[in-house]
Amino acid sequence: MTTFYRTTKVDGLTIFYREAGPKDAPVILLLHGFPTSSRMFRNLIPALADRYHLIAPDYPGFGYSETPPADQFQYTFDHLADIMDDFVTQLGLKKYSLYVQDYGAPVGYRLAVRHPER
């Protein structure tokens, strides 16, 4: 199955993400660790893409996403969760499972607490 490389604007920032799998399949949001990017899922995505819709974003300052200057952007888990929350909303994801690694855990935890219905 093909992995697509996409970008979208979220809160004025260009966010890169990988997407694969059928659009009508259950969604898994893959949140990467530190100091990595969505590339860490390059082998996992093809293994699951036949039965799941997979979305793996790069946080701001990581991978191919835009890197705002540290004096103009708060690189905190709270703020990264805000960006990922807006990213998920922009993509129209109503329900998804989280697959988190390292840095993805505190970001994903914040998403789960804010929106347990998702």
Image (cartoon, helix red, strand yellow):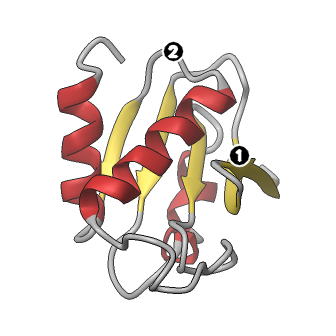
Structural crowding at the residue carrying mark 1, measured as other residues with C-alpha within 10 Å and reported as few (<14), some (14–19) or many (≥20) = many
- Viewer-proximal residue, 10 or 64? 10
- Image height of 51 relative to 29, above or below: above
Which corner quadrant of the image does residue 102 belong to?
bottom left
Q: Which mark is residue 41?
A: none
Give SS at disc 1: strand
**64 lies above or below 93:** below
Among the 4 quarters of the image, the one containing residue 34? bottom left
Q: Position of residue 2 (x, y in %)?
A: 82, 53
Identity of the residue drawn at 43% across and 26% down = 96
Residue 93 pos. (x, y %): 57, 23
Q: Which residue is mark 2?
A: 94
Reading the image, the residue beneath label 1 is 20
Amino acid at dot 2: Lys
Q: Which callout, 1 or 2, points to the residue nearer the camera?
A: 2
Q: Residue at x 40, y 67 (%)?
A: 32
Image: 101 above or below 53: below
